[in-house]
Image (cartoon, helix red, strand yellow):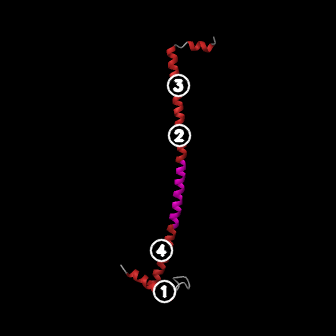
Amino acid sequence: MTRQYKRLEAFTQTKRRWLRRVISSAIEAFVAMRRALLSLGSMMARVEAMEHRQAEDEARQLTVQARNDENQARNEERFDAIFKAMDDGDFPLQKVFYDGQLRLTQTRRAYTRASRLRASP
């Protein structure tokens, strides 16, 4: 008999069953933990991808918001200049629009409508 076989005979039948159960439950626990970690890894990859997309979307929204704010400020300056010229009476009829875009009668009608709108409460 070999040495290993003699060692196995040192355990009784009950101790061998107990040892087999302990080892098999440890292996099952290891396999379950390995599966959980594998599924957790794929889940973490998905979460990281979502976070990356969210960060890109937020950056894109900030850029769009900044561009909208710039356009809003530029448009307010233009309207303020037009309304100031209308209030001062220095309203250059043809310079509000592109050169030759409107005839003088259309420009006067637009001016009259704009002044009525400003006068209404």
Looking at the rendered image, the disc whose residue lies closer to the viewer, 3 or 4, is: 3
Residue that carries the numbered disc 1 in the rendered image: 106
Question: Is 66 part of what is drawn in magenta?
Answer: yes
Residue that carries the numbered disc 3 in the rendered image: 24
Which quadrant: the N terminus? top right
Nearer-the-camera pick, 73 or 14:
14
**Majority secondary structure of magenta residues:** helix
Q: Which mark is residue 39?
A: 2
Tell which circle, 3 or 4, labels the residue nearer the N-terminal end.
3
Tell which circle, 2 or 4, labels the residue nearer the N-terminal end.
2
* Inter-mark Cα distance, 1 to 2: 71 Å
Tell which circle, 2 or 3, labels the residue nearer the N-terminal end.
3
Question: Is label 2 in a helix, a strand or a loop?
Answer: helix
Q: Which mark is residue 26?
A: none
* Inter-mark Cα distance, 2 to 3: 22 Å
* Inter-mark Cα distance, 3 to 4: 77 Å
What's the residue at 53%, 44% (across, down)? 44
Q: Which mark is residue 76?
A: 4
